[in-house]
Amino acid sequence: MTYDPTGHLLLNPVDKEASARARRLRELGLGERPDPAFDAFARRLAEATGAPFSMVNFIDENRQFFAGMHTPEGTLSGSDLGAAAAGAAAGHLGRSLARDRGYCPYVVVRRKALVLEDVCDYPRFAGNPVVDEIGVRSYMGAPLIDRTGTALGAVCVFDTEVRAWGRMGLETIKAMAAELMDQIHRREDGLL
């Protein structure tokens, strides 16, 4: 983590594995384009947790890429690639996000799940730009750690309202992250 003496907030975590992660993502062919199977997985994740937003997020040296995503009807859907290009800066969620936004980079560097029932209760996270730009108020994510030990990214859910995810929510997102890693490994082995 780095400290900003002017803002007195902890900034994005130092990610010493970014280059190795980017190489591994390229080997697996992940993180460059949307994937209908990951969109379907994100939809299942949203249903399982009751969250309106969910993502399969791969993180390289420069950005986060939502290879799978689910959003509520009336906003950007996972298959609406034209609108995705506008991105979060225009006030809605696109397929990519800068590394200094959101909470998945923390999940990846820490290599463990993160549950924020109300992001405003945590000074480290309350000032993140996604709070104002997208309206994130509650977040839960779990890392995607592959068989080589590389944290490829995260699966996450969020809401624009405070949520009590509880132990059941944490167990659900961790189990679904493991399920997705099994799917990715089967793809790598040519079994899918």
Image (cartoon, helix red, strand yellow):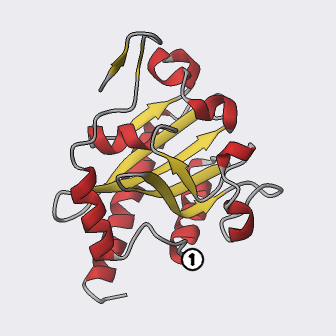
Could you say where residue 63 lies in the image, as x and y percent from the top left?
45, 52
Can residue 103 be seen here? The reply is yes
Seen from the viewer's position, the closer of residues 133 and 46 is 133
Extreme right residue here?
A: 74
Could you say where residue 180 lies in the image, as x and y percent from the top left?
39, 66
Please give the name of the residue rendered at 68% of the width and 35% of the height, measured from the top-left corner: 133
Q: Is residue 40 left or right of residue 23?
A: right
Could you say where residue 115 lies in the image, as x and y percent from the top left?
45, 33
Q: Residues within 10 Å of mark 1 (few under 14, many from 20)?
A: some
Could you say where residue 187 lies in the image, as x and y percent from the top left?
33, 82
Q: Is residue 155 left or right of residue 187?
A: right
**Quarter residue 12 falls in:** top left
Under circle 1, the secondary element is: helix
Can residue 160 be seen here? The reply is no
Extreme left residue here?
A: 148
Instruction: Specify the amino acid type for callout 1.
Output: Pro
Seen from the viewer's position, the closer of residues 29 and 114 is 29
Task: Name the residue beneath numbered marker 1.
Answer: 36
Image quarter in which the N terminus is found: top left
Please give the name of the residue rendered at 34% of the width and 73% of the height, measured from the top-left corner: 184
Image quarter in which the C terminus is found: bottom left
Please give the name of the residue rendered at 45% of the width and 44% of the height, measured from the top-left corner: 99
Extreme front residue here?
A: 6
**Quarter residue 27 falls in:** bottom left
Q: What is the count of numbered marks?
A: 1
Q: Is residue 30 left or right of residue 133?
A: left
User: Compared with residue 154, is residue 101 higher up or lower down, i.e. above or below?
Assistant: above
**Quarter residue 39 falls in:** bottom right
Please give the name of the residue rendered at 25% of the width and 55% of the height, measured from the top-left corner: 19
